[in-house]
Amino acid sequence: MKNKLAVLIPALNEEKNIREVIQGVRKAVAGEIVVIDDASSDSTARVARQAGAKVLPLLLRLGAWGATRTGIRYASQHRFEIAVTMDADGQHLPDAICELIEPLISNLADVVVGSCTERGSIPRKLSWLFFRKMTGLNVRDLTSGFRAYNAAAISTLMTADTALLDYQDIGVLLALNKAGFRILEVPVRMCPRSSGHSRVFSSWWDVFRYLIFTLILCFAKVDMPAVSGYRSEIG
């Protein structure tokens, strides 16, 4: 028997935020809440368990996408029909989960990206524009990790195409686009971090590395034909 919904929350040292995030998800939707603890050095896992989440502890730090993919593997193994990925820092609002999953339930899309372009600085918006031109992806908020996947997309995310990715944004979308999935973008509201700072871009070196890595992906996929049926509600 298939389970309906899994909400996957990769977390690294988010003991101050994770309880509130879990409580918000529980109020917003009925589903299993899965926290993937990316080898945190604080009490993230303990707090998440106390809040009632299923916790998948990682012995080695895998990074944002590695942790997310661990959650997606869990969703695949337990035959969930829909998996939602969201941040553990309070930026993604649980109330928007219903908006993300509705197009999947209505069979209007296979993948839904929660888009909040207002949060982007001018350099970030310029980079989004550049990478959209490079890839042909019709998604304005390319770096949003607030997403929903149907069962077929969940299965595809477990293939070798995504195993070696470092980040959960453009490379994942390119792999899904290549596989022919319908990707829909819906506007959502996001908040600043409740506390702490970004774990992905903690230095200018991390930003530079991300840009180079993503540029290489774009060159590798730039000749990939566009997938018919692709649509977006924005732009």
Image: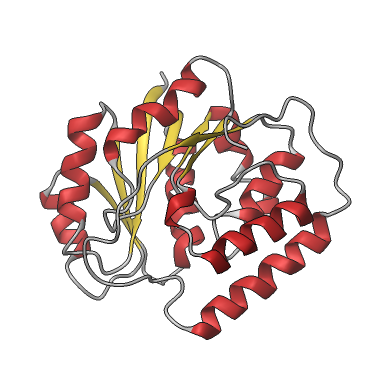
For residue 33, above or below residue 21: above
Extreme front residue here? 122
Residue 164 appearing in the image: no
Apparent side of residue 186 relative to residue 91 in the rendered image (left or right): right
Q: Which quarter of the figure is the C terminus placed in?
A: top right
Q: Nearer the viewer, residue 76 or 101?
A: 101
Colour basis: secondary structure
Q: Give the percent coordinates (x, y) of residue 231.
A: 67, 29
- In the figure, 36 relative to 102: above or below? below
Where residue 98 sits: x, y (%)?
35, 27
Coordinates of residue 116 in the picture (x, y in percent): 45, 47
Residue pictured at 22% horizontal, 61% vertical: 194
Q: Quadrant of residue 94?
A: top left
Tell me if residue 77 comes above or below residue 119 in the rendering: above
Outermost top residue: 106
Q: Nearer the viewer, residue 203 or 175?
A: 203
Relative to 111, 202 lies left or right: left
